[in-house]
Image: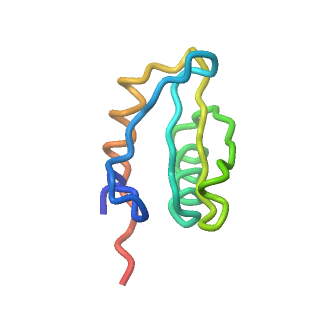
Amino acid sequence: MAFKIDPKTQQRVVVHVHEVYGPYIRVSADQDAGALEYVFNAQYYMPYWKAKPKEFENDGGREYYFRGAADPVKLQAILDTIEFPQMV
């Protein structure tokens, strides 16, 4: 299953750009956040820092910031190719 739709919001996961912190994404579910961190660390070696927004507290969601050096277009292309195993 491609990692393109956030299971809670049912919206496509897209790269946003914060005027101070640069490109970032929001993931509302803990399971996807953990799997995404694994991919960032093990496959892409992507540096990031994370925050936990108040609206995601109950579900364990997170925001991932990639700093101003990251290219938002390339980051979106990476997100669009990430695949997670289908859960049954």
Q: Report the residue that reaches farthest toward the front.
A: 55
Classify residue 23 as left or right of residue 50: left
Q: Residue at x 33, y 59 (%)?
A: 10
Q: Quadrant of the C terminus?
A: bottom left
Q: Residue at left 40%, top 64%?
A: 7
Query: Residue 24 location in percent, x, y?
Result: 53, 32
- Quadrant for residue 14, please give it: top left
Residue 66 location, x and y as percent?
58, 28
Image quarter of the N terminus? bottom left
Specify whether 78 is left or right of 50. Answer: left
> At x 50% / y 60%, what residue is drawn?
32
* In the rendered image, the vertical position of residue 15 relative to residue 50, given as above or below: above
Percent of width and height locating residue 83: 36, 56
The residue at the point 53 percent across, 62 percent down is 29
Q: Nearer the viewer, residue 49 or 62?
A: 62
Location of residue 46 with respect to 26 vertically, above or below: above
Between 31 and 56, the residue placed more toward the observer is 56
Rendering colour mode: rainbow
Number of marks in the rendered image:
0
Q: Is residue 84 above or below residue 49?
A: below
Image location (x, y in percent) of residue 74 = 38, 25
